[in-house]
Amino acid sequence: MTQAGRQGSPRKGSGRSGTERNTSQRNTSEGGNSGGGFRGGAAKRGGGFGSERSHRAPKPREERFVDPDEAAGAPPGRGATDPKAAKPSSRKPAARKPGAKKAPGTPGALKPKPRTGRPGAAASKAFGSERFGQNLGPVRRPSRKRGPRGEVPQSELHDADGVRLQKVMASAGVASRRVCEEMIAEGRVEVDGQVVTELGVRIDPKTAVVHVDGLRIQLDENLVYMVFNKPKGVVSTMEDPEGRPCISDFLRHQQGERLFHVGRLDVATEGLLLLTNDGELANRLTHPSYEVPKTYLVQVRGPFPQGIGAQLKEGVELEDGFASVDSFRLVDSTPGHVLIEVVLHSGKNRIVRRLFDAVGFPVLRLVRVKVGPIGLGDQRQGSIRNLGKQEVGHLLASVGL
């Protein structure tokens, strides 16, 4: 074999002829990729001919399906085949706007829209930014006669040495000063029983009684309102000469406050006790004329026959007079035990236990879960918490304060 034949032999070469190698080098040079092949240099940076891409045909546009029934309600000339009719709205939902979840009156919250005068129009809520306490809904106040709105001139409510009404409300935590001004202009604020609509009215916070949407605003910062979830075995007194556990044993941060409990629970009864230094409120809550309802959960042995609930609602004769419950509801029933909810406004000693003893079903366990509008909720036993301002307003309103 000649020398030329040996050079072209596939055994000694790289698998392609010299002509092919020259052609490859020439193509690389024409492409302008002098920066290290196709992956480096101009093709990667988007410059030169090496960066040109092969033409691709655009994908066919997918038509959005539109329900014919929905398209029937579209404006004239826009049906199911009109893409403008199926175009979604570009407006953000109200729930996704910044500040939508913030309470009215707090920094960054959405500004409330002005009311149109409709009775049911939405408005900012008093103490809407409060973090603690329970939301008890609309205020339920005892019915009382009110004179016409113009019976007392608003000028008589003005105290030149006092504080502006909207500033007093904002300091009490009702809302921001701007929102408080809107509440006054909308006629939602009362001072001493008179509706105020003028923004320039000044009042004396020490003597004035202010309501917003029927909710009493407590302006005296020295008054304390608390809820105690009393465990079994604790005596409903602040001190016990026999050395038994009492309420003061659970008061850790209020040693300097002179608090007293509203009503009593016997040693074996658990549940809600109100603690306060507001004497007027305590007197009204315990006075029979205000008929503040109290809710109890009663556990007795089962089965519980029908007719006993109706008997308790009609009334039972006890040693100190006639007594009855306001409502009776069967909550749960398990083999051997029945759980019952009763509501009554009587404040007689051991009244619930004596009522169930009279009908032949002694109480195994008794828990008071609610007094007026205030409930225990998920508060753990033995704990004490401060009432929220909304709760205080509802509690005061329930006894006409």
Image: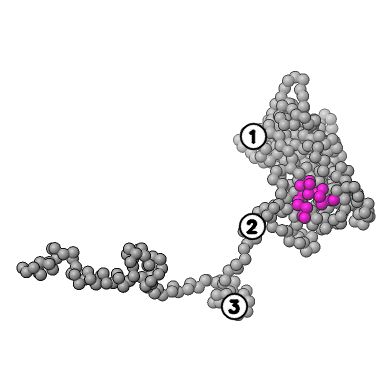
Is residue 269 something that shows in the picture? no
Residue 10: x %, y % from top left: 14, 65
C-alpha separation, residue under disc 2 versus residue under disc 1: 52 Å
Q: Which mark is residue 360?
A: none
- Residue 66, image quadrant: bottom right
Choose between 369 and 181: the one closer to the eye: 181
In the picture of the structure, the residue carrying the numbered disc 1 is: 337
Disc 2 secondary structure class: loop
Q: Give the residue at x 13% y 63%.
A: 11
Q: Nearer the viewer, mark 2 or mark 1?
A: 2
Image height check: is 61 above or below 153?
Answer: below
Question: Quick one: label 3, few (<14), some, or many (20+) residues within 10 Å?
Answer: some
The overriding secondary structure of the stretch rendered in magenta is: helix
Residue 127: x %, y % from top left: 75, 48
In the picture of the structure, the residue carrying the numbered disc 3 is: 78
Quadrant where the N terminus is found in the figure: bottom left
User: Which label's residue is closer to the chain start, 3 or 1?
Assistant: 3
Q: Give the residue at x 82% y 46%.
A: 216
Looking at numbered disc 2 in the image, what kind of residue is underneath it? Pro
Magenta run includes residue 59: no
In the picture of the structure, the residue carrying the numbered disc 2 is: 98
Q: Residue furthest bottom?
A: 77
Question: Quick one: label 1, few (<14), some, or many (20+) residues within 10 Å?
Answer: some
Color encoding of the figure:
one colour
